[in-house]
Amino acid sequence: MYFSATDNSAYVAKRIAAATGEQAVSMTELPSSVTIREGEMLGIVCPVYFWNLPVYVEEFMQRLELHGPRPSYLFFLCTYGTTSGATSVQIRSHFSVRGMEMDAGFSLKMPDTWTPLFDLSDAEKVAAQNRAADERLEEIIEDIRSHRQGDHMDRGVPVFLAILARMAYEQARKTKHLRIESACIGCGLCAKDCPEQAIAMKKAEDGADARPVMVKEKCGLCLRCLHRCPVFAIQYGSRTRKHGQYVHDAAKS
């Protein structure tokens, strides 16, 4: 199971699934009730947001119902830009309340897609980061295939720091920080793809063509709308325009 806005985590999950004979399915396409088959592995793959699990992943894990036998191997992998945060502790707690202990946790450094801060405009630098990630991913895949046990997370932070970062995340994910520029062509892709359904297409009172409008006070801050807009008409703050858009190359092929 994976959550991904710019296909970093989707790419990783699909690579693992291909190597292990399992399936990679997006959380946005899964029901809240999942049946585990005998001998089946279960992995959660997602990015780190503000040193924490994305709110969508938190909500998904809270409502998830697992049926059937215990997975033959239960693991977590986070993709991160600067730190894996406290995600290992958080995901373990979600399984612990279900009476299940995780077998292993992994982390993989990839391009940081939080472009209000990080610059992804240098294509060569981004490609180098992804090549390094591919090399590390090969090692992780072998660990998963061999059912390696233990916590192998890099660059974690104490839980109390993650709690403080969560407070910042709650402020940052207010949709008032996002703006839709006049370059918008009204394609509706942002509204269609928003995992939090925080965007809707609405016609103006003068009868003009429908344009995207933020309809919720908060979103998950995945920036899927910003990075996947075909005309780069969605911005967050003052830096995203010059910091560029990013979608993993695997999604472009």
Image (tube, grey):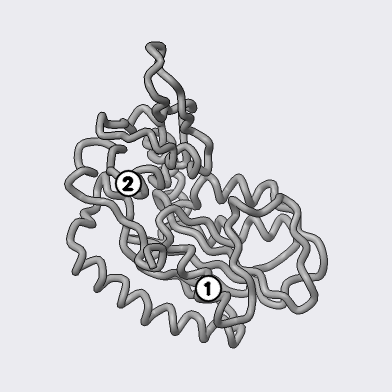
Query: Which of label 2 and label 1 is nearer to you?
Result: 2
Asked if the residue under mark 1 is in contact with the one under mark 2, i.e. CB atoms within 8 Å, the reply is no
Q: Nearer the viewer, residue 101 or 161?
A: 101
Spot occupied by residue 208 in the image (x, y as percentages of width and height): 37, 19
**Residue 126 in the image, given as x and y percentages of width and height:** 25, 66
Residue drawn 63% across and 80% down?
21
Q: Quadrant of residue 213?
A: top left
Disc nearer the start of the sequence (2/1): 1
Which residue has dot 1 on it?
A: 151
Residue 74 drawn above or below residue 246: below
The residue at 28%/52% (across/down) is 245
Q: Is residue 65 left or right of residue 238?
A: right
Q: Mark 2: few, some, or many residues within 10 Å (few <14, many ≥20)?
A: some
Quarter of the figure that contains the N terminus = bottom right
In the picture of the structure, the residue carrying the numbered disc 2 is: 230
Up/down of 193 relative to 103, above or below: above
Q: Secondary structure at mark 2?
A: loop
Q: CA distance from mark 2 to mark 1?
A: 39 Å
- Give the residue type that dot 1 points to: Asp
How packed mark 1 is, by other alpha carbons closer than 10 Å (few <14, some 14-19, many 20 or more), is some
Q: Is residue 226 above or below residue 41?
A: above
Q: Nearer the viewer, residue 251 or 114?
A: 251
Residue plotted at (41% across, 15% down):
207
Depth order, front residue of 201/14:
201
